[in-house]
Amino acid sequence: MPDHAAPAATSNRDASHWRNDGSIAETIERSLANEAAIGLLYDSHPYVVVMGTPADIEDLAVGFTLTERIAEFRDIEKISITQTDEGLLADILLSPRASRAVSLARRRTLESRSSCGLCGVESLRDAVRPIPRVTHGPNLTHSAIQRALAMLDSGQALGNQTRATHAAAWADANGDVRMIREDVGRHNALDKLVGAATRARLDPREAFIIVTSRCSYEMVEKTAAAGVSILVAISAPTALAIEKATAAGMTLVALARSDGHCVFTGAQCIVT
């Protein structure tokens, strides 16, 4: 980062709080999630701009590189993060071998919104590409899934403060959450989590991921690209997400709430 301080993840704003019981509106102060433009560059060449929470930017850069299948972690030589008047820039320096492959990666031609996983992709072929197969991961009990859900619920510091962010959690076979990342964008939260776990050298073959969003097929694709074979989502999956999970050999659990969950694919990996 440059000499001046990095932008904060939250800011406070006043609001007039009205209640439907007819009481007089009162002025309150709310903590809000900040959203900033984050440019990702490879070898100083612009690649994409995402809108996200201005925190854990190095995790985002690593995770995006991996889940978009742009390069492997070993090919990331350096990440330089700078702040500008317009937002943040993360310049990812790749090995010469990987740099040649970037031009062949899925290209983006415009900024990505916080809710969009494929904004700016140029062709239908790039949008829905073959998904990588995953290796067999841990066998989970239903209670381990519920344990991780409870830990995620209490561990969302930014979400509990602002009620405006998504979260992604990395959990082990016992249901113990090892790390959580949060962002206003669900794809960003997952990318940050994958980046953080990879930098910490956590083994994807011994883990499962939980996301607090709906389970679209991009979330399945990013999880598979990270080498994690089990994805748990709090909201419902799309039909294409189920198809992609099946093609990848993944276990997909969704509608995961405090009172239970639904197993859509890979039920053989969930034991009683």
Image (tube, rainbow, N blue to C red):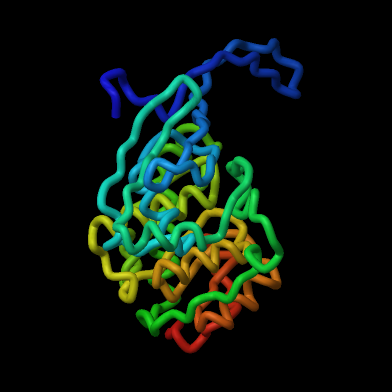
Which residue is painted at 36% across and 41% down in the image? 56
Toward the viewer: 196 or 2? 2
Toward the viewer: 60 or 234? 60
| Figure quadrant of the N terminus | top left
| Residue 205, position as x, y percentages in the image | 33, 76
Which residue is painted at 62% across and 58% down in the image? 214
Asked where in the image residue 27 lies, by quadrant, the reply is: top right
| Residue 142, position as x, y percentages in the image | 45, 75
| Figure quadrant of the C terminus | bottom left
Q: Is residue 132 left or right of residue 171?
A: right
Which residue is painted at 24% across and 57% down in the image? 200
Any part of residue 246 in sight: yes
* Relative to 34, residue 243 above or below: below
* Relative to 63, residue 232 above or below: below
Any part of residue 151 in sight: no
| Residue 213, position as x, y percentages in the image | 57, 54
Q: Residue furthest bottom?
A: 268
Q: Is residue 186 left or right of residue 101?
A: right
| Residue 80, position as x, y percentages in the image | 31, 38
Count of marks, rendered view = 0
* Relative to 148, residue 116 above or below: above
Which residue is painted at 32% across and 48% down in the image? 93
